[in-house]
Amino acid sequence: MSDQFKVHCDCGAVEATATGNPRVHGFCHCEDCRELLQVPYHSVLAWESDQLAITRGKGESIEFKHPSKNMTRVFCKHCGEVLYNTNAMGWKIVSQLMFRKCNDDQLPAGFESNGHFFYGRRIVNIDDALPKR
Ligand SMILES: [Zn+2]
Ligand SMILES: [Zn+2]
């Protein structure tokens, strides 16, 4: 059986469960993440659509579809915290910060960021040793 990982929002009303390893673990510098989440870049763990599901409080969550981009963000209607967002490929993207907060403040082995993605579209420069593509 594959490993399962849970995240929940600040107030605990909504919980999502991911199964198996994320497809991508790194930092995303694309403008889509910036616009959807209002962040300079995003720390991502990205699972395929069928690898992650809301497992508690689905009725307490709201799915907002961006008016022009093929993206959504799914958040708790009580505390407002985003559980995950989806990108144009339908991947479900969990913030590494939220994942850490809900999993003993650490990432499992193999989940550490291994690169910066869409680095050419960045608005901030990163001075670290990770590959940039
Ligand atoms: Zn909540
Ligand atoms: Zn992005």
Image (cartoon, grey):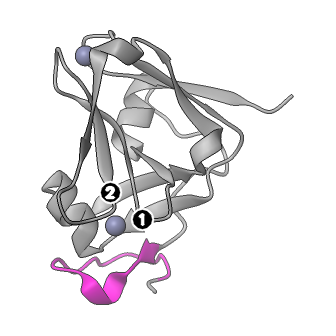
Q: In the drawing, what numbered circle is on residue 88?
A: 1
Give yes or no for residue 124 being in the magenta stretch: yes
From the Cβ of disc 1, is ligand 2 less than 8 Å away?
A: no
Determine whether, in the image, residue 95 is placed left or right of residue 56: left
Residue 111: x, y in percent? 59, 50
Give yes or no for residue 54 being in the magenta stretch: no
Of 8 and 131, nearer the camera is: 8
As displayed, is residue 34 above or below residue 129? above
Q: Residues at badges 2 and 1 in contact (C-beta under 8 Å)?
A: yes
Q: Quadrant of the N terminus?
A: top right
Residue located at (47% from left, 63% from top): 26
Q: Main secondary structure of the magenta part?
A: loop
- Dot 1 falls on a residue whose secondary structure is loop
Determine whether, in the image, residue 51 is placed left or right of residue 44: right
As displayed, is residue 31 above or below residue 101? below
- Dot 2 falls on a residue whose secondary structure is loop
Real-space CA distance between mark 2 and mark 1, rounded to the nearest whole angstrom: 6 Å
Amino acid type of the residue that numbered disc 1 sits on in the rendered structure: Ala
Residue 122: x, y in percent? 23, 81
As displayed, is residue 112 above or below residue 55? below
Name the residue tied to disc 2: 71
Which stretch did the figure color magenta?
116-131
Determine whether, in the image, residue 112 is placed left or right of residue 38: right
From the Cβ of disc 2, is ligand 2 less than 8 Å away?
A: no
Q: In the drawing, what numbered circle is on residue 12?
A: none
Residue 64: x, y in percent? 23, 41
